[in-house]
Image (spheres, rainbow, N blue to C red):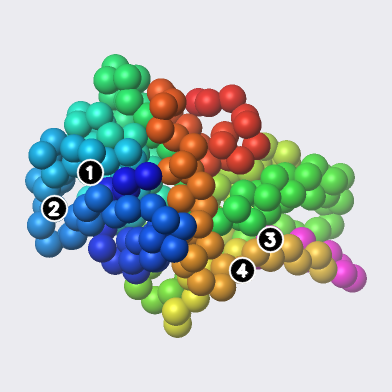
Amino acid sequence: MRIAIIGNGRMGAAVAAAARAQGHAIHTMVTRAENQSGAALTPDRLVGSDVAIEFTNPKAVVPNLERLIDVGVPVITGTTGWLEELPRIEEQVRSRGGALLHATNFAVGVQVFLRAARTLALEMRRWDDFDATILEHHHINKVDAPSGTAFSLQHALAQSDSRRPFPITSIRSGSTPGTHTLTYAGPHETIAFTHSTRNRTAFAAGALLAAEWLPGRRGVFHFSDMLFREESR
C-alpha cells in the first residue's frame, strides 16, 4: 500500500515508522511548512497514493480534507477539534464519491473502552448517590481541551444515561499521549474505569488498520464502523 502522510509531527512520524515496519511504502510526507491551507495537496503530489493519513491540527484539518476529497484520495484523519464542520465535509465526500474515515482516537482499546463505558453507565442509571465524572490527561502541547476522546466518552455515556451531565476535567502536563478515567464516586465506594495510552504506536497501528480497510469503499465512516461493523453514517 502506498500512503500519503499529511503532517510531519509526532503522529506523522509514528505512522510512517509503523507503516514501513509493516511493509507499506510512504508515497509522500507533506510537512506543515509547505502546506498552508492545503496548498501542497495537489494531484501531481498525490497521484499513485492508495490512501492518505492526516494528523495535523484543528486549523489545518478542514482545508486538508477538502483538498484530499477533491483530488479523490481516500483519507483517514485522527485530528480532533473540527467536528462542527463534519456535516459539510460529509456532503462533499458524498457529492464527490469519495471516502473518509475519522475518529477522535485510533487506539483500538479506546474504542472498546467507549463501548464498555456505555454498558457501565446503563448499569449505574438507578444509583443516584454516585457522582460521575471524566478526567482526561494529555501532554502539555495538546491544543484542544477537553480532548476529542473525552467528548466522545461523554457522548457515549449520555446515550446510556441522559440524566447525568458527566463533567470533564482536563489536565495538560508532561508528555503522556493520553489517559481517560471515568469515575463513579459514591458515599462509601468508588468505581474508576481507565484507559491509558503508553505511546503513539497505538494510534498509528489503528490508523493503519483503517487505511488498509478504507480503499475501495465510498462514504463517511467512523473507526468503530470498521472495528465493529456498525452501519456507516
Residue placed farthest to the bottom in the image?
Answer: 174
> Looking at the image, is mark 2 or mark 4 earlier in the sequence?
2
Report crowding for label 3: few under 14, some 14 to 19, many 20 or more residues within 10 A (C-alpha): many
> Looking at the image, is mark 3 or mark 1 earlier in the sequence?
1
Residue drawn where x is 56% and y is 37% of the image: 226
Q: Is residue 132 left or right of residue 23?
A: right
The N terminus lies in quadrant: top left
Q: Secondary structure at mark 4?
A: strand
> Looking at the image, is mark 3 or mark 2 earlier in the sequence?
2
Mark 3 to mark 4 CA distance (whole Å): 12 Å
Mark 1 to mark 2 CA distance (whole Å): 9 Å
List the residue tagged with mark 1.
Answer: 64
The percent position of residue 204, horizontal first and vertical second, equals: 46, 58
Asked if labels 2 and 1 touch by Cβ distance under 8 angstroms, the answer is yes
Residue drawn where x is 18% and y is 60% of the image: 31
| Of the two numbered discs 2 and 4 in the rendering, the one whose residue sits closer to the viewer | 2
Amino acid tagged 4 = Ser
Mark 4 to mark 1 CA distance (whole Å): 29 Å
Mark 3 to mark 1 CA distance (whole Å): 33 Å
Q: Secondary structure at mark 1?
A: helix
Report crowding for label 1: few under 14, some 14 to 19, many 20 or more residues within 10 A (C-alpha): many
In this view of the protein, which residue sits in the foreground, 90 or 67?
Answer: 67
List the residue tagged with mark 2.
Answer: 35
Q: Secondary structure at mark 2?
A: loop
> Looking at the image, is mark 3 or mark 4 earlier in the sequence?
3
| Of the two numbered discs 3 and 1 in the rendering, the one whose residue sits closer to the viewer | 1
List the residue tagged with mark 3.
Answer: 182
Residue 196: mark: 4
